[in-house]
Image (cartoon, rainbow, N blue to C red):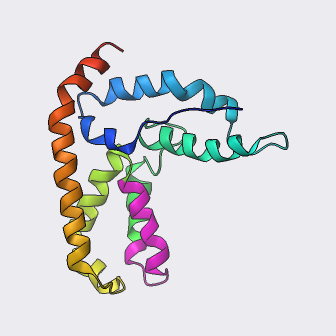
């Protein structure tokens, strides 16, 4: 049985631009060999654990590890084209909005997605289906931001020291 403990996405706020190269090196050193061993495709002999681990590990290395072979729309031209699908009436907004969610979860894609959302906010609102519960969702989002900022404040210096030793 293959097991691995993948760090929580909560570590993301701790990874500043200055720390990103050390973070990515550490992740690849820790998980890279296992990801290569698992490969991209399922095999007949794969256990249930392996079948569940493969997509999680590959996704983690693609997003947090910024793996050049795995990252989601790393090329700016491709990323802009993918985000433009959110404005294209030929595509169902509910389906293509996943592109923005996925891209925003990547270290460099988050900034690109945010800039796209700001620049096209009115057009996106016009295309998006209306959701109820906006005030509650906003309150929950603000609470997550507050908790994230508090976590970063408490942990950043220790995290920086740890990555400096890697």
Task: Indicate left or right for 100 with 33 as reference.
Answer: left
The vertical placement of 161 against 77, above or below, is above
Stretch of the chain drawn in magenta: 85-104
* Residue at point 80%, 42% (across, down): 43
Residue 120: tell me if it is visible: no
Q: Is residue 95 visible?
A: yes
Residue at 42 percent across and 23 percent down: it is 26
Q: Looking at the rendering, which quadrant does residue 157 occupy?
A: top left
Instruction: Please say whether residue 97 is one of the residues in the magenta stretch.
Output: yes
Residue at position x 27%, y 27% in the image: 19
Instruction: Report x, y in % for residue 33.
Output: 60, 24
Magenta residues, dominant SS class: helix
Q: Quadrant of residue 11?
A: top left
Q: Position of residue 123 (x, y in %)?
A: 27, 80
How many dots with numbers? 0
Compared across the picture, whether 138 is left or right of 54 comes to left
Q: Which residue: 85% across, 44% down?
A: 44
Q: Residue 87 location, x and y as percent?
A: 37, 77
Q: Is residue 162 left or right of residue 103?
A: left
Q: Residue furthest right?
A: 44
Q: Quadrant of the C terminus?
A: top left
Indicate the quadrant containing the N terminus: top left, top right, bottom left or bottom right.
Answer: top right
Is 88 within the magenta? yes
Write down the quadrant of residue 160 in the picture. top left
Vertical order, 27 against 161 (above or below) = below
Residue lying at the far top of the rendered structure: 165
Residue 100 at x, y = what percent? 39, 63
């Amino acid at each position: 049985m293959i097991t691995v403990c993948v760090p929580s996405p909560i570590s993301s706020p701790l990874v500043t631009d200055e720390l990103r190269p050390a973070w990515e090196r550490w992740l690849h050193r820790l998980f890279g060999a296992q990801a290569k061993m698992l490969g991209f495709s399922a095999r007949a002999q794969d256990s249930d654990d392996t079948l569940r681990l493969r997509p999680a590990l590959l996704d983690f290395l693609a997003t947090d590890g910024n793996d050049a072979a795995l990252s989601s729309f790393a090329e700016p031209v491709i990323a802009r084209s993918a985000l433009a699908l959110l404005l294209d009436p030929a595509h169902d907004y509910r389906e293509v909005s996943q592109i923005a969610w996925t891209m925003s979860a990547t270290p460099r894609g988050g900034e690109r997605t945010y800039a796209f959302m700001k620049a096209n906010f009115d057009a996106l609102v016009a295309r998006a289906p209306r959701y109820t519960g906006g005030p509650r969702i906003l309150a929950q989002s603000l609470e997550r931001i507050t908790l994230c900022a508090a976590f970063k404040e408490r942990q950043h210096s220790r995290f920086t020291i740890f990555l400096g030793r890697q």
